Image (cartoon, rainbow, N blue to C red):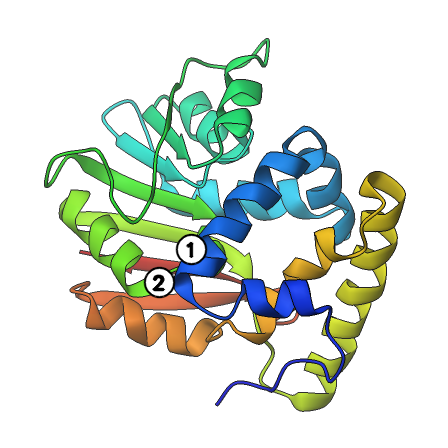
Amino acid sequence: MLDNPDPNPAPRLRDALASPETKRRYVRRLFSTIADRYDLITAVLSYGQDRRWKQRLTELAAAGPATQALDLACGTGDIAFSLARRGARVVGLDITHRMVQIARGKRGVPAVDFVTGDMMALPFGDATFDLVTTGYGIRNVPGIGQALAEMHRVLKPGGVLLSLDFNRPVNPAVRAVYLAYLTVVGSALGFVLHRDPDTYRYIPESIRRYPGAIQVNALILQHGFRESEYRPVLFGLMAIHHARK
């Protein structure tokens, strides 16, 4: 069972996450707002470990020149570029066009095809990719089940899904401290960068409503994957899911 929200959350944020449709609209506006500061914020809220976690995901992918890969919620391209450096042919997809623009504008990086699109309605045929990756995508998508079904659909038989995301700690005391940290730091960053504390309070609020790694693992299996496991990262505050079609 999920925790109740904070007793006094900002009404706008609480209402924005109340349903899949309101979350869809809010997330689209939010990531358009923060796109130009996305790399900075991700580094700060991940305790400076974000790139190392993404590198770990890339190593688990074991991608090579024969790998056709799709990176969902690609943001500014970190995972996509890391896979491409290993020789994979990569498509990066994000619903926020500004993120795609920033990724396309990076210099000194391997070639990646970036497209704007919705991970709940992927514009690709069945069994197209050997590998699907996503960093922080499953938690942010309005419909987790629909997104997982789409990932399963576009993977070839035997294809691999890898997902990195914040976890929702099972221990109530650890969860309380974790969410309090994200709320305080997120509120401060939101005020300093956007004059709106709610901007990054979205992250702890989304974690409160997130099923957590154990339940996401079960959802992956329910949506057709024949095997799935997750690896705790940062003492279980983060997780990498590793599944196979």
Residue 141 is tagged as 1
**Seen in the image, is 24 located left or right of residue 9?**
left
Q: Secondary structure at mark 1?
A: loop
**Residue 175 sits in quarter:** bottom right
**Residue projecting furthest to the top:** 107
Image position of 203 with respect to 54: above or below: below
Residue 162 is tagged as none
For the residue marked with disc 1, what is the amino acid? Val
For the residue marked with disc 2, what is the amino acid? Ile
Q: Secondary structure at mark 2?
A: helix
For disc 2, the marked residue is 144
Residue 10 seen in the figure: yes
In this view, the residue in front, 157 or 63, is 157
In this view, the residue in front, 181 or 158, is 181
Residue name at image x 89 percent, y 44 percent:
192
Q: Position of residue 80 (x, y in %)?
A: 45, 30
Q: Position of residue 116 (x, y in %)?
A: 38, 28
